Image: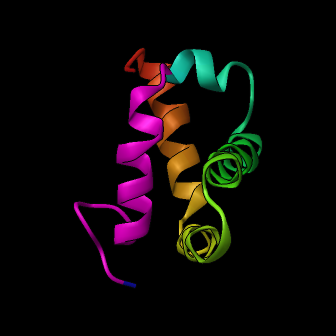
Amino acid sequence: MSHHNRWANAETWRVQLEIFSRLDAADTVGNMNAAEVANWAEEYACSIVEQNATGNARDWAMEYLSSVNWGEIATHLVDAAREGVA
């Protein structure tokens, strides 16, 4: 496993940076546990791709998202919500 800016891989870091860092963690996480947040995060990111991309671009973006460590993003969001960090 390669590490990128302390994230599991470049895909996880980039998705966290481009999509989830803009969200308020406390509002996003609410009362969800890490597994629920991971499922939500994957569905949310995939819905962005599905709404905005078509054809090969959509396929490539979905393939990129398949490499994301959703559990790591979820843990980060849960921890940030507990600490009151956006």
Q: Residue at x 48, y 19 (%)?
A: 24
Magenta span of residues: 2-24
Q: Residue at x 48, y 33 (%)?
A: 79
Give the camera-side residue of 63 and 25. Answer: 63
Q: Is residue 68 left or right of residue 37?
A: left
Residue 73, x across and y down, in percent: 51, 49
Q: In the rendered image of this protein, does residue 6 appear above or below residue 16?
A: below
- Indicate the quadrant where residue 57 lies: bottom right
Give the camera-side residue of 86 and 17. Answer: 17
Residue 77, x across and y down, in percent: 51, 35
- Indicate the quadrant where residue 31 lies: top right
- Residue 20 in the magenta stretch? The answer is yes
Q: Residue at x 71, y 47 (%)?
A: 47
- Residue 55 in the magenta stretch? The answer is no
Colouring convention used in this rendered image of the protein: rainbow
Q: In the rendered image of this protein, does residue 82 appear above or below residue 71?
A: above
Q: Residue at x 44, y 62 (%)?
A: 12
